[in-house]
Amino acid sequence: MSEFDSQSTQNIHWYPGHMTKTRRRMEECIKLVDGVVEIIDARIPMSSRNPEIDSITAHRPRIVLLNKADIADGAATSRWIDYFSGQGARAIACDCKTGKGLYHFSDEVRKLLADKIAQWEAKGMGGRSIKLMVVGIPNVGKSSFINRMAKGGKAKVADRPGVTRGNQWFTIGGGIELLDTPGVLWPKFDDREVGRKLAFTGAVKDAVVDLETLCLDFLGYMIRYYPERLCERYKLISVEGIQPLDAMELIAKKRGMIMRGGEIDYERVSVMIMDEYRGGKLGRISLEVPEDMTGKEK
């Protein structure tokens, strides 16, 4: 799933000024924790990871939460769980908003840190709190996870990138404390494909992309990998062999998005398609599978 039917050479650049400061904070705070909870988007597990997180959190045991698994392709998510397990992490498919998949989080933490906990008990420190740092790029679900686990904690949530600021500790029960951190993202997207995938899911603000071009790229992907989902959602007979622009125009006509004079309202239909994808209305769709990692650093 690594190729797209590209409509342009659109590149996405986004460099919020707080990113450098965030890295410094994380490097300071990693010394305070026993492990790391990394939250990623189950639809784009690799593209929704910051490549610097591995170096920042080096040698700390890790649990990977594949958030939004409810709108990702289940078969692909299962393969991703195997992939991360092979990297030495424990991986959980979940939905941080509803809490689905998180019921055994504490048990997974204790399995992850079994050796460390045994060492504490041997030293008479069996009641010590387990401290975990929660990391992830903006809009991936960190605050939703903390609020769910802390049963309504004070972590602020908003459906837009970069809302979390500062560091906060949350006690979630089971002798576990979570350290929240600001969102972390690349200073720039050197890999155009990564930038597009993040834009598809809404992790990048629509204001910095050409939404119509983005939608055409997305339709090209859907025609190739999930044509049946397009046909089902928009009552199309078939999209086999057609171009993304043709598909967009068919969808616009089906939804009545026509301006005066019979012109297609491309902006309106683009917004609608991307919103419906992000809201899960197109079904469970993944944009990456572990096989895409062939030949790349793991």
Image: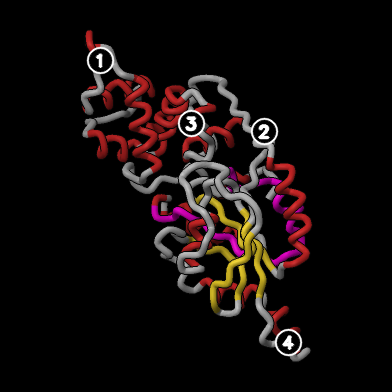
Sequence-wise, which precedes: disc 3 or disc 2? 2
Q: Which residue corresponds to mark 1?
A: 259
Helix, strand or loop at label 2? It is loop
**280 drawn magenta:** no
Q: Which residue corresponds to mark 2?
A: 188
The residue range painted magenta reads: 46-70
Q: Which mark is residue 125?
A: 4
Q: Residue at x 73, y 45 (%)?
A: 21
Question: Looking at the image, do the residues carrying marks 1 and 4 touch, with CB atoms under 8 Å apart?
Answer: no
Identity, as a three-letter code, of the amino acid under mark 4:
Met
Q: Which residue corresponds to mark 3?
A: 206
Label 1 to label 2: alpha-carbon separation: 37 Å
Identity, as a three-letter code, of the amino acid under mark 2:
Lys
Label 1 to label 4: alpha-carbon separation: 70 Å
Question: Looking at the image, do the residues carrying marks 3 and 2 touch, with CB atoms under 8 Å apart?
Answer: no
- Nearest the viewer among 183 and 38 is 183
Say if residue 86 shows up in the picture. Answer: no
The image shows residue 3 at horizontal and vertical percentages of: 53, 33
Identity, as a three-letter code, of the amino acid under mark 3:
Asp
Identity, as a three-letter code, of the amino acid under mark 1:
Met
Dot 3 surroundings within 10 Å: few (below 14), some, or many (20 or more)? Answer: some
Sequence-wise, which precedes: disc 2 or disc 4? 4
Say if residue 20 shows up in the picture. Answer: yes
